[in-house]
């Protein structure tokens, strides 16, 4: 690796702390009483862990086996010394041994925390941590046993003054990952400061500052993978009169994101968000945002939006919104202006509930460019496995997508955290279960897309939907979406996107059964299709100790060119207690995609078995995956067996 490993004093210090901790624990184990000088030992505990991990990955031309034995013993003590109101401590040490593919290696670890609690003053905490984590990294391709050394050093300072509460945190972490094909080194420093002030019931403020530096290198290329610096400043000012339902909120957010190395770029974003509640039934929101993007092609964006929301009793909600934006690029400008009207009417009727909704919008975009490539900075998308999420622009440039968390402190990896799926001229982004993006997380997406350099066009959208709920078990719905794009200036023969989409659906819940059916007919300039979907699901509890469920789904999509697609999926779940102490969890899943001349089948099996007796815990987690495609075969078997005890 290009960066030096930690010096030997870290290892020596960890061993010394471990020995001192064990001696202290053994010497003081029988006594929990108060010691001289006001010192006392409050808790003592530890853990024992032993386990084995096995994985087997195969493709048509390669096979990789990995095997790991692991054992670990840890001890932790905590207490107070001297004046119990002044100093609190926590010491933990562990000693582990791993045997992985003829590699035998012991590893020590420690964690230390000192908490100063001066009475009527500022609490201060110092902490340090060294740990080692080993596990199988699941991905397409060989699944190596990877090892991560994690070292964290930091301090927290609490602030407590009249009507002011805050905290200062300084943190340094050091991560070193030893993989099968490459080693990665990451050094991360962060500083955060926050406080809130409430001088009266009518007025409150909140301030947050976060700054972080990350330096990451990868040994296989012998060069820097990336280095990034982030700066985040947030401020909230709220005024709430006696009527809590009315008032004014002002939110300020300033962030700077600087990345060098591979795919370098720099972004700056400033946003002002003013929310005004003049009356309980009326809401107003004004938002201004400025963003600057510096890379191979610089750009700056100004946007202003205004919306009004009115609630008429509990039946009618009206949202009137307008927006305008201007993108300044190094070779031209893009201007956009538009407005929308959203109406939602909800009414109880004798046979159930009726919901009517209309959403209409008009937007004009004017392109005055020399080139056809336009960057998009910080597009917010919420990822869920149950929702299809498309990027807002068409013709996204390959390899230009960068996905980060909302604070710009984490860059997610394609193929591990998310997956990009091409859908004609659009791109779908989907989270991968088990990655760092959790269900329902909102992420920021930066990318570039291709457009006409000299073109002005209007986009009109109309969405109408009717939902009818009958006796709380049956839902019928109809949706119709119309998108029309017309050229105002430029090439009149350029093909824009016109589409007419109609959806008819039924959703029926009968006890533990659920039946869904949906028909969609889409007539588009680019790709027209018709689709029919049918799903039946069953899930029930058997007594208090078992749950079983299964769902079957079939979706058929028909295209004019005859390249039709059929997707069949099956997913089941079994959870059951066996006796008083065993818990069984089994999940089978199967997916088959059929196209003309191309089929893909994927089988996933997961088995979990756990046993608990007092403080002892035994767990088995086994998974099997097999993918059979016309051009590729792939299989993966993975199992972990663990025995652990805490005291």
Image (cartoon, rainbow, N blue to C red):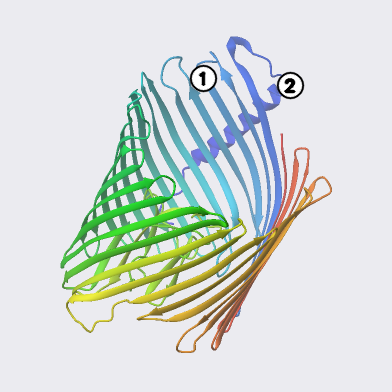
Mark linked to residue 87: 1
The image shows a total of numbered marks equal to 2
Q: Nearer the viewer, residue 533 or 297?
A: 533
Q: Are marks 2 and 1 in contact (CB under 8 Å)?
A: no
Residue 444 lies, in percent from the top left, at 37, 56
Write down the residue under mark 2: 30
Residue 228 lies, in percent from the top left, at 34, 52
Which of disc 1 and disc 2 is earlier in sequence? Answer: 2
Does dot 2 land on a helix, a strand or a loop? loop
Mark 1 closeness class: few <14, some 14–19, many ≥20 residues within 10 Å: some
Quarter-of-image position of residue 371 = bottom left
Up the image or down, 319 lies above or below 191; here it is below
Residue 357 lies, in percent from the top left, at 41, 60
Mark 2 closeness class: few <14, some 14–19, many ≥20 residues within 10 Å: few
Up the image or down, 120 lies above or below 383; here it is above
- Image quarter (top left, top right, bottom left or bottom right) of the N terminus: bottom left
- Image quarter (top left, top right, bottom left or bottom right) of the C terminus: top right
* Mark pair 2, 1: CA separation: 23 Å
- Furthest residue to the front? 350
Residue 493 lies, in percent from the top left, at 23, 84
Does dot 1 land on a helix, a strand or a loop? strand
**Residue depicted at x 30% and y 74%:** 484
Q: Nearer the viewer, residue 620 or 80?
A: 620
Q: Is residue 432 left or right of residue 325?
A: right
Mark linked to residue 261: none
Quarter-of-image position of residue 486 = bottom left
Q: Nearer the viewer, residue 302 or 132?
A: 302
Can residue 2 be seen in the rendering of this structure? no
Up the image or down, 322 lies above or below 506; here it is above
């Amino acid at each position: 690796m290009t960066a030096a490993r930690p010096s030997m004093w870290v290892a020596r210090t960890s061993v010394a702390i471990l020995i001192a901790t064990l001696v202290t624990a053994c010497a003081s184990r029988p006594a929990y009483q108060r010691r001289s000088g006001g010192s006392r030992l409050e808790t003592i505990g530890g853990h024992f862990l032993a386990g084995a991990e096995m994985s087997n990955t195969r493709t048509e031309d390669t096979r990789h086996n990995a095997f790991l034995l692991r054992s670990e013993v840890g001890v932790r003590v905590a207490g107070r010394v001297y004046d119990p109101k002044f100093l609190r401590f926590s010491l933990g040490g562990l000693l582990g041994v791993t045997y992985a593919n003829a590699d035998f290696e012991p590893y020590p670890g420690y964690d230390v925390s000192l908490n100063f609690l001066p009475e009527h003053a500022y609490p201060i905490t110092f902490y340090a941590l060294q740990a080692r984590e080993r596990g199988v990294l699941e991905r397409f391709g060989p699944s190596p046993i990877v090892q991560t050394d994690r070292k964290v050093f930091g301090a927290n300072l609490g602030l407590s003054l009249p009507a002011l509460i805050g905290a200062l945190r300084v943190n340094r972490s050091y991560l070193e990952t030893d993989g099968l094909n490459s080693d990665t080194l990451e050094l991360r420093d962060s500083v955060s400061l926050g406080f809130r002030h409430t001088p009266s019931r009518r007025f409150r403020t909140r301030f947050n500052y976060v700054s972080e530096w990350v330096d990451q290198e990868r040994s296989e290329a012998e060069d820097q993978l990336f280095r990034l610096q982030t700066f985040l400043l947030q401020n909230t000012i709220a005024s709430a009169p006696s009527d809590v339902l009315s008032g004014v909120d002002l939110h300020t957010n300033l962030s700077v994101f600087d990345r060098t190395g591979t795919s370098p770029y720099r972004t700056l974003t400033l946003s002002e968000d003013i929310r005004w509640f003049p009356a309980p039934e009326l809401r107003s929101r004004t938002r201004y945002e400025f963003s600057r993007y510096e890379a191979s092609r610089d750009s700056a964006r100004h946007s202003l939006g205004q919306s009004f929301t009115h609630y008429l009793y509990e039946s009618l909600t009206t949202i009137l919104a307008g927006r305008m934006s201007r993108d300044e690029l190094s070779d031209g400008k893009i201007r956009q202006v538009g407005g929308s009207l959203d109406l939602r009417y909800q009414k109880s009727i004798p046979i159930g509930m009726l919901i009517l909704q209309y959403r209409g919008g008009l937007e004009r975009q004017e392109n005055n460019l020399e080139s056809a490539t336009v960057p998009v900075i910080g597009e917010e998308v919420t990822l869920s496995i149950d929702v299809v999420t498309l990027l807002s622009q068409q013709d996204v440039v390959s390899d230009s997508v960068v996905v980060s968390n909302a604070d710009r402190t984490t860059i997610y990896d394609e193929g591990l955290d998310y997956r990009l799926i091409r859908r004609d001229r659009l791109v779908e982004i989907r989270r991968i279960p088990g990655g760092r993006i959790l269900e329902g997380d909102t992420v920021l997406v930066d990318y570039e897309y291709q457009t006409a350099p000299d073109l002005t066009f209007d986009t009109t959208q109309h969405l109408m939907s009717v939902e009818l709920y009958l006796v709380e078990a049956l839902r019928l719905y109809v949706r119709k979406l119309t998108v029309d794009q017309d050229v105002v200036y430029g090439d009149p023969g350029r093909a824009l996107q016109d589409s007419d989409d109609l959806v008819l659906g039924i959703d029926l819940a009968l006890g533990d059964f659920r039946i869904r059916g949906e028909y969609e007919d889409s007539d588009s300039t680019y790709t027209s299709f018709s689709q029919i979907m049918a799903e039946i699901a069953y899930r029930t509890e058997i007594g208090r100790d078992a749950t079983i469920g299964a769902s079957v789904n079939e979706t058929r999509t028909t295209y004019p060119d005859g390249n039709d697609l059929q997707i069949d999926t099956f997913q089941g779940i079994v959870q059951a207690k066996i006796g008083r102490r065993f818990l069984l969890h089994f999940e089978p899943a199967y997916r088959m995609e059929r196209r003309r001349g191309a089929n893909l089948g994927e089988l996933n099996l997961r088995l979990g078995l756990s046993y608990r007796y007092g403080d002892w815990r035994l767990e088995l987690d086994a998974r099997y995956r097999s993918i059979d495609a016309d051009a590729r075969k792939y299989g993966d078997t993975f199992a972990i067996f663990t025995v652990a005890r805490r005291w």
